[in-house]
Amino acid sequence: MKKEQTGLHKLLRQREFTLVLIIIGLSLLISLFSEFFLTSANILSMSTALTVEGIIVIGMVLLLIIGGLDLSVGSVMAFTGVITAMMINAQLPVALAIILGLAIATLFGVVNGLLISKMKLNAFITTLGMMMVVKGLMLVISNGRAILNMPPAFKALGQTRWLGIQIPVFIMIFLVIVMDLLLRNLRVMRQGYFVG
């Protein structure tokens, strides 16, 4: 009995629990004004729409913990999508195109990191500049047009469903759980809190 009370007390003291209560409260409040808000179709639609941002947030959390800042993530993500789509349209295998796209995104991150850590440039200015450079590159290589006609193998990554829910939602949930466990239990990750 005492152990159960300790567990409940520990849960109530966590900041995340308060956030969950606020989200539930706001959801109930909004549902009073719209009968469609808490429908399964709307919840599935919102969860699918937020997966990309959710996955980006995982990386941003690490950056914010160590006191960093990166304004270029949105542009780098868009550029990665464009360059990957162009490689797939150029008949590269889907898996290889994705790996190369991620490698290019990593390269932008490495350049940002080196400019900030080695050359001691301000993170805000550096990543703002990188955002503009990457956005310009993306517009030049794509001629400002959307890349269409993706093969079914590529579309399957975002459109395949399991238990009625699209796969990216499960990927995001898995990554959030893994990152949470690493941040709580891995010493190297915990040391980031001291840096930031």
Image (cartoon, helix red, strand yellow):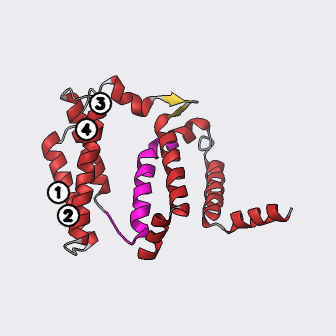
The residue that label 2 is drawn on is 129
For the residue pair 195 and 139, the one nearer the viewer reads as: 195
Alpha-carbon span between mark 3 and mark 2: 31 Å
Visible in this render: residue 125? no
Kind of element beneath mark 1: helix
Of the numbered discs 3 and 4, the one sitting upstream in the chain is: 4
Residue 58 magenta = yes
Of the numbered discs 4 and 1, the one sitting upstream in the chain is: 4
User: Residue sitting at 81 percent across and 63 percent down?
Assistant: 3
The residue that label 4 is drawn on is 84
For the residue pair 7 and 87, the one nearer the viewer reads as: 7
Rendering coords of residue 90 (x, y %): 18, 29
Of the numbered discs 2 and 4, the one sitting upstream in the chain is: 4
178 relative to 102 in the view: left or right: right
- The residue furthest right is 1
User: Which is closer to the viewer, label 3 or label 2?
Assistant: 3
What's the magenta region?
Answer: 47-70
In this rendering, the answer to whether 118 lies above or below 139 is below
The residue that label 3 is drawn on is 94
Q: Which mark is residue 133?
A: 1
Residue 21 magenta = no
In this rendering, the answer to whether 131 lies above or below 120 is above
Visible in this render: residue 97? yes
Q: What's the amino acid at mark 4?
A: Thr
30 relative to 119 in the view: left or right: right
Alpha-carbon span between mark 1 and mark 3: 26 Å
Magenta region, main secondary structure: helix
Alpha-carbon span between mark 2 and mark 1: 6 Å
Kind of element beneath mark 4: helix
Give yes or no for contact between labels 2 and 1 (Cβ–Cβ under 8 Å): yes
Q: Residues within 10 Å of mark 3 (few under 14, many from 20)?
A: some
Rendering coords of residue 54 (x, y %): 45, 51
